[in-house]
Image (cartoon, grey):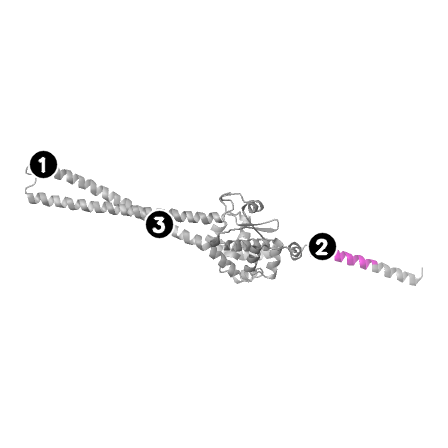
Amino acid sequence: MNSEEERRDHKSDAKSWGIVLLGLGLAFFMTWLVQQWWVKDLWRGFGYTPSSEMAEIAESLELTGKGERIFAATRPALEGKEAFNEHCDSHDAEVALLGCYAGGQIFVYQVEDEELRRVNHVTTAHELLHAVWERLDEGEKERIGGMLRELMAEKQEWFDEELEAYSEEEQLEEVYTRAGTKLVELPEELEKHYRETFENRGQIVAYYEEYSAPFEELQEKLKTLEQEIVAENQTIEEQKAEYERRATAWEAKVAQFNSCARAMGCFTSDAEFQSKRQAMTAEQTELEDLRQSVNRRIDENNARVDEYNKLRRELGELDEAMNSNKKL
């Protein structure tokens, strides 16, 4: 083989290896590419058309481009009781589950009560944050998690109540979704992170406060009424005891007065008789006034109890409106 032929063979081999390396590089790149969340989200969101109600919710959440991409990828659906309970495995009548992120999709229980309709917006935002959390890499989760732990320490009482139904492993993610949708003030670095998904997180918090207001108002009224009822019951019991004591003492005086009236010479004069009789009559009037006062207090407190029970029913109706397992 002459030198010219050898050069051609070397060039051919180099070209072949170049093609192989290019192909391997392209294969590795394509494998890496399809594993990226943003690529998977674009694919999953292709062709998704939300219902008119969900489209209105999406618009009201003021999503960023990233938020819109994840929203479409998770294909949020507003659902009635039967479909929602099946998708979210919600069958406990004591637990008012409003939404879930399951199998890469968001399901929201459609609350139709006009007074509570904003709960649909907040639930959608909450579940969207579950999807965002899933897409964070471990380093970012650790960074955000550190800020969330500090927030939990600052607002321990609030979070204790919010997280009592969750295991320790689930709590950090739940803090993430709740802080982003319910707390007005957050550390700036954490606020900056949420701005990657929501352009106006404050509006979502406003929606939360709007639908929470009827609950908080009723709960405050119930708390005040309960305190009044307990305090008034104590006063009534004290006045009843006083009435019983004075009535018993008065009856003893009456018996003594009558006994004296039947005995010759017990009263030294008619004036003494009339004086003691008038005093006992006055005391009887005071006792009757006290009895009527106690009865009025009882009637007024019974009215408080009726109002308390009425408000409890109203609160129960609000709870039922947000519980897909009620009246199944």
Q: Earlier in the sequence, mark 3 or mark 1?
A: 3
Label 3 vs label 2: CA separation?
66 Å
- Comparing marks 1 and 2, which lies closer to the viewer? 1
- Comparing marks 3 and 2, which lies closer to the viewer? 3
Name the secondary structure under disc 1.
helix
Residue 32: x percent and y percent? 70, 56
Residue name at image x 78 percent, y 57 percent: 23
Q: Most prominent secondary structure in the magenta stretch?
A: helix
Q: Visible in this render: residue 73?
A: yes
Name the secondary structure under disc 3.
helix
Q: Earlier in the sequence, mark 1 or mark 2?
A: 2
Label 3 vs label 1: CA separation?
52 Å
Residue 224: x percent and y percent? 36, 52
Circle 3: residue type: Gln
Neighbourhood count class around disc 1 (C-alpha, 10 Å): few under 14, some 14–19, many 20 upward: few
Residue name at image x 20 percent, y 40 percent: 248
Label 1 vs label 2: CA separation?
116 Å
Residues rendered magenta in the picture: 16-33
Name the secondary structure under disc 2.
helix
Circle 1: residue type: Arg
Residue at mark 3: 227
Q: Earlier in the sequence, mark 3 or mark 2?
A: 2
- Frontmost residue, 222 versus 53: 53
Residue 138: x percent and y percent? 61, 54
Task: Answer whether residue 23 is magenta in the image.
Answer: yes
The outermost residue toward the right is 1
Q: Is residue 28 left or right of residue 232?
A: right
Residue at mark 1: 262
Circle 2: residue type: Thr
As drawn, the label of residue 31 is 2
- Frontmost residue, 114 versus 302: 114
